[in-house]
Image: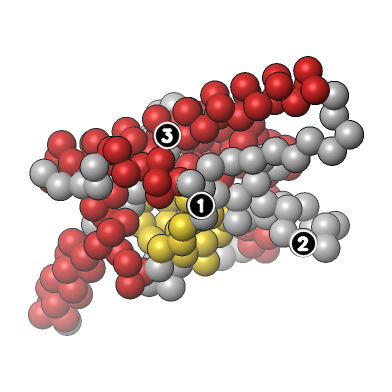
Amino acid sequence: MATLTKDSVDKWFTHNLDTDNRVLYMGSVDKTSEYESGVDHLMAESFIKGLHVLESKNNSEITIVMNNPGGEWYHGMAIFDAIQNAKCHCTIKVYGYAMSMGSIILQAADKRILMPNSRFMIHYGGTSFDDASLPLIEKWVSEERRINHDMEEIYLKAMLDKEEKEGHGYLAKTLSNILDSPKAFSKKAELKKEEAGMSDDEKKKKQEKEEKDKLLTKRE
């Protein structure tokens, strides 16, 4: 790890960016709100700028530390596209939670890791129509259907990719049943998450770390 300096620490807390170790932190950015702001224009702008900064330095792997309650679809998809089209290998590590839009952004990473006490939640999106005209409501309902279809496609691709690689996975036809109402998974349900293809196998990573630790102990 690089030597800590005041400038590097300031970047962590001000810009959610650790340039020395190539780490981006993805959490709520708006500090003026009483509640967590989640995925919004501020998070999207800050994150995409930070990703471009790391990409411009070199092509080494980027780690994204996520603690994301979800939020707006369009700004979330801006982040999703930025990660998916990054020239660097991107790993997302989830601390806390990856819920709603956060769970979709997670699928853009090359490697997805859920920490032991993290939570993962998926569901269809929704929009309120207070004081809206009928034609406007009809247009938004059509748009919501398109968004829900895009959401299904993202999750379904993750499921089928996992099934193709490892020979198991949730049947695709169960996806809409899962999305019909919010469903949260904990680390205790990791097997289900892995079968669904929405996260990667942490057990193998743990075994590799244990083997590495044993090797280092022998060397000492």
Label of residue 35 in the image: 2
At numbered mark 3, what does the secondary structure look like: helix, strand or loop? helix
Disc number lying in front (1 or 3): 1
Disc nearer the start of the sequence (1/2): 2
Q: Position of residue 206 (x, y in %)?
A: 23, 68
- At horizontal 51% and vertical 52% (from top left) the residue drawn is 181
Q: Identify residue type, mark 3.
A: Glu
Disc nearer the start of the sequence (3/2): 2
Disc number lying in front (1 or 2): 1
Q: Identify residue type, mark 1.
A: Ser
Q: Position of residue 101 (x, y in %)?
A: 56, 45
Q: Identify residue type, mark 2.
A: Tyr
Residue placed furthest toward the front: 134
Q: CA distance from mark 3 to mark 2?
A: 28 Å
Height in image: 198 above or below 1?
above
List the residue tagged with mark 1: 181
| Quarter of the view holding residue 113 | bottom left
- At horizontal 52% and vertical 66% (from top left) the residue drawn is 96
At numbered mark 2, what does the secondary structure look like: helix, strand or loop? loop
Disc nearer the start of the sequence (1/3): 3
Q: Nearer the viewer, residue 31 or 77?
A: 77
Q: Is residue 204 left or right of residue 14?
A: left
Label of residue 152 in the image: 3
Q: CA distance from mark 1 to mark 3?
A: 14 Å
Q: CA distance from mark 1 to mark 2?
A: 23 Å
